[in-house]
Image (tube, rainbow, N blue to C red):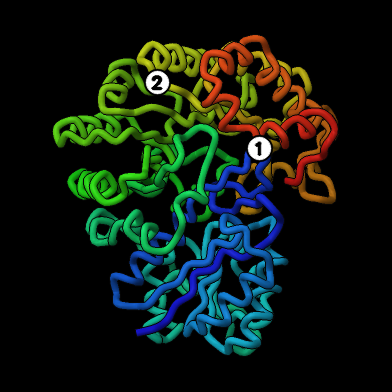
Amino acid sequence: MSKILLLSPPYLPEYMRNARCDFVSLSATQWYPILLGYCGAYLEGKGHEVKLIDAPSQRLNHEQARKIATDYRPDLLVLYTGLMSEKNDLEFTDSLLEKLKCDAVIVGPYASIDPEGTLGRARSINKLVAGEFEYPVGEVAARGKAQGIRNLLYKENGKVVRNPARPYLGTKELDAMPFVSRFFRGHIDIYRYKTPSEPYPFMDIMTGRGCKWGLCTYCLWVHTFVKGSCYNLRSIANVMDELHFIERDMPAVRSVMIQDDTFTQERAAEFCEAKIREGIKIPWSCYTRADLDREVLKLMKRSGCRNLHVGYESASERVLTLIKKGLTVERMTKFTEDAKHSGLRIHGDFALGFPEETVEDAEKTIEWAYRLNPDTAQFQLMIPYPGTPFYELMVKNKWLNACGQPDMPKFSNEQIRMMAKKAYRRFYLSPRYICKCLRHPRDHFFNRLKTIRRAVPAMFWKKWEV
């Protein structure tokens, strides 16, 4: 059996690469390294010794992370990269390998954007997995021949060779995976992970992989990790067993965040009915599209759901059609009314810098977000990930600046940044939000003092790192 090091390398302070986009977080948000966690759980289940270094959440600098890695002396290093941090990640790991003299493999959705290019830019690393990576990494750890490992790319005679893809993991394989929550309990400090929309501390899990909709042109995971309209599920019994484990063996956890790309209506109903039947009390949250009906939303509330993470994106019907969102402003507005009527909180995800978007479209989105009045909201500067249809359209029309950021004739990069700042001011400095702070000072003010200290300059004069 092998000693395996799972590495999310150090980079900038408050950098986050564990989510569906990578950026320096203004809110000090750190999601769990969910995909590395599942890989670690799988490898431990196969009898390997595993160590996880999640440097951004542990606030490790390069020297500190280097010492931990060299003291561990792994047989295999598994590198999880980001897009923004790729150069840093490869250089840091290449220098590590000069001392460790061990095998190494690159993994993750960011590495799957341009796997040949990423592997080609690595000096010492000679392997990369595109897509789901538990089984391929397990085969690498077992000293399998590179030529026979599906999903693997490897260097041979100075060239990058790409093996055939493997089928996605189905219910049988996902159920056989040890619980990621059990792996996290043994390997990380759960108090290092927080987000403004969730109780602290919380736990991340997945009940399925892929997105049932799977058509949005801008989404990284549906174009690199589990592609297209595909939602492969764990059995409900298996999920309930994990919730029982968290409730029993991790009493500090105050809520569970389901990290499925979108929790569908059918899955939500099945999950809620089982959770109520099993008598599991722990609160939970999830990502969902804004198309669930009121009856399911009420059922979710009864089962202990507290917060929905909802991608609204834009108030422009033209933009929504172009990005293949598959929803209208009217439908999403109705969903929001139903969710609030059911007693559910909402974290609204809005974005600026879509193809053909204008300043007027952005104004509409800002006002719509204000009218919808979710409990919390974010206004993302769009990141065009190579390999997505969004990126290809932006390149075709020459709508990207030298940094690869949206910069369009009718909506310049400077205007996009200006409108994002305006959006945050409109939402968080409004009398309505100040009233929320007065009604719930702990949730909206005292628990977010660090975020507020960073947000104020970001809303007015500081340029964001994206």
Q: Position of residue 407 (x, y in %)?
A: 81, 38
* Tag 1 and tag 2, C-beta contact below 8 Å: no
SS state under label 2: loop
Residue 317 appears in view? yes
The quadrant of the rendering that contains the N terminus is: bottom left
Measure the C-alpha gap from mark 1 to mark 2: 26 Å
Q: Residue at point 53% right, 39% down?
A: 195
SS state under label 1: helix
Q: Is residue 250 left or right of residue 72?
A: left
> For mark 2, what is the residue?
344
Mark number, residue 95: none
Q: Position of residue 336 (x, y in %)?
A: 46, 16
Q: Is residue 86 left or right of residue 198?
A: right
Q: Is residue 212 left or right of residue 154?
A: left
Q: Splitting the image into 4 quarters, where does residue 360 fall?
A: top right
Above or below: residue 267 compared with residue 232:
above
What residue type is disc 2 on?
Answer: Leu
Residue sitting at the far left: 277
> For mark 1, what is the residue?
450
Q: Residue at point 35% right, 56% down?
A: 180
What residue type is disc 1 on?
Answer: Lys
